[in-house]
Image: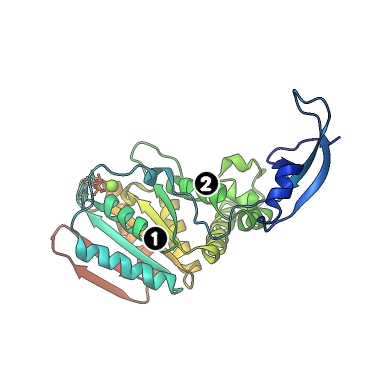
């Protein structure tokens, strides 16, 4: 008698006969099963099914709600994002900084760009920093958590086999990782390296459009990780889109974060172009 396992797809003989002509994968007999309300055991077949590898990653929760108001204007900025995305897809990692006053539309522009990129096959990842939550690596917890849960199964499995212990820092549900085996700096490097390898591997399946929203509230380790990734992923189809406020001159933390952010983005810069946009409150710089 067959013992059922979680996640299995079992069908009866009739469905097996009907589906065999259309299903590319294997459908194999796994014995018989007692079913409630049916007198005799039923012969069952297991369907080997995986999500098609061409499907892009599920959208992050932050992008799933469709805004009530349609997107208007920002033609120049949208074109800037489109160009950065095209360069990234061609295999040259891009970093795009979107800065401006509170409420001017930074997040909306970034997400609008993400939706447009998704039409061309992008996998979207998004992490937000928060003023109230002082959790280290906050945006990366969202980004890597989503990537591990919804990224290509084989790629994620291969990366977890190598570095689940390190990634546990960002994805506690992995449940691995014991006491640190090295000093804090070395452990941090291992974490950065693991994140870099995961993103590089995922970007081979679908180019990645990674939003880091509200980076003016990001903690220093998050910015250091961003800096590491801009170097580690230099020849990969990845676009990092970072939004931050640059108007709050009173908050020391904001000033400090913004400065680190500029350093982070320019560390791997081979080309820097500042674009003065229609509105004086906007600045977008595109960097490699
Ligand atoms: N081009 C646009 N067309 C339509 N609505 C827009 C546009 N840009 C922004 N909005 C709307 O304006 C509001 C503020 O935008 P958004 O949240 O993107 O600002 P922000 O600059 O990210 O603000 P914050 O600094 O607080 O994070 C949102 O409701 C957003 O949907
Ligand atoms: Mg915002």
Identity of the residue drawn at 75% across and 45% down: 46
Identity of the residue drawn at 50% across and 53% down: 57
| Image-based side of 149 in relation to 264, left or right | right
Q: Quadrant of the C terminus?
A: bottom left
Label 1 lies in ligand 1 vicinity (Cβ under 8 Å): no
Q: Is residue 56 above or below residue 204?
A: above
Of the pair 237 and 6, the residue shown nearer to us: 6
Identity of the residue drawn at 25% across and 42% down: 68
SS category of the residue bearing label 1: loop
Residue 74 is situated, as x and y percent measured from the top left of the image, at 20, 59
Tell me how the rendering is colored: rainbow
Asked where in the image residue 112 lies, by quadrant, the reply is bottom left
Residue 196 is situated, as x and y percent measured from the top left of the image, at 53, 61
Asked where in the image residue 35 lies, by quadrant, the reply is top right
Q: Is residue 268 visible?
A: no
- Discs 2, 1 touching: Cβ within 8 Å: no
The residue pinned by badge 2 equals 145
The residue mark sitting in front, 2 or 1, is: 1
Q: Residues within 10 Å of mark 2 (few under 14, many from 20)?
A: many
Q: Residue furthest bottom?
A: 270
| Image-based side of 24 in relation to 247, left or right | right
Q: Is residue 20 above or below residue 65?
A: below
Identity of the residue drawn at 67% across and 58% down: 24
Of the pair 61 and 173, the residue shown nearer to us: 61
Q: Which mark is residue 258?
A: none
Residue 11 is situated, as x and y percent measured from the top left of the image, at 72, 41
Q: Quadrant of the N terminus?
A: top right
The residue pinned by badge 1 equals 119
Q: Is residue 124 above or below residue 66?
A: below
SS category of the residue bearing label 2: helix
């Amino acid at each position: 008698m067959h013992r059922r396992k979680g996640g299995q797809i079992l069908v009866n003989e009739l469905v097996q006969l009907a589906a065999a002509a259309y299903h590319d994968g294997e459908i194999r007999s796994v014995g018989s099963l007692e079913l409630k309300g049916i007198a005799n055991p039923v012969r069952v077949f297991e369907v080997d099914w995986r999500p098609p590898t061409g499907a892009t990653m599920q959208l992050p929760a932050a992008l799933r709600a469709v805004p009530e108001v349609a997107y208007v204007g920002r033609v120049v900025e949208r074109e800037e994002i489109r160009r950065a995305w095209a360069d990234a897809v061609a295999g040259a990692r891009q970093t795009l900084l979107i800065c401006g006053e509170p409420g001017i539309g930074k997040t909306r522009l970034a997400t609008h760009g993400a939706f447009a990129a998704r039409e061309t096959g992008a996998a979207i990842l998004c992490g937000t920093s928060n003023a109230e939550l002082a959790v280290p690596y906050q945006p990366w917890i969202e980004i890597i958590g989503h990537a591990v849960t919804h990224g290509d199964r084989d790629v994620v499995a291969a990366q977890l086999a190598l570095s689940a212990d390190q990634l546990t820092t960002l994805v506690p549900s992995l449940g691995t990782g014991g006491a640190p085996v090295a000093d804090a700096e070395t452990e941090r490097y291992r974490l950065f390296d693991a994140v870099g390898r995961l993103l590089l591997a995922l970007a081979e399946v679908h180019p990645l459009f990674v939003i880091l929203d509200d980076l003016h509230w990001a903690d220093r380790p998050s910015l250091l990780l961003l800096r590491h990734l801009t170097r580690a992923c230099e020849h990969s189809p990845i676009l990092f889109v970072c939004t931050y406020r640059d108007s709050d001159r009173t908050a020391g933390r904001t000033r400090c974060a913004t400065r680190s952010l500029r350093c982070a983005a320019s560390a791997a810069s081979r080309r820097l172009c500042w674009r003065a946009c229609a509105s004086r409150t906007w600045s977008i710089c595109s960097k490699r």
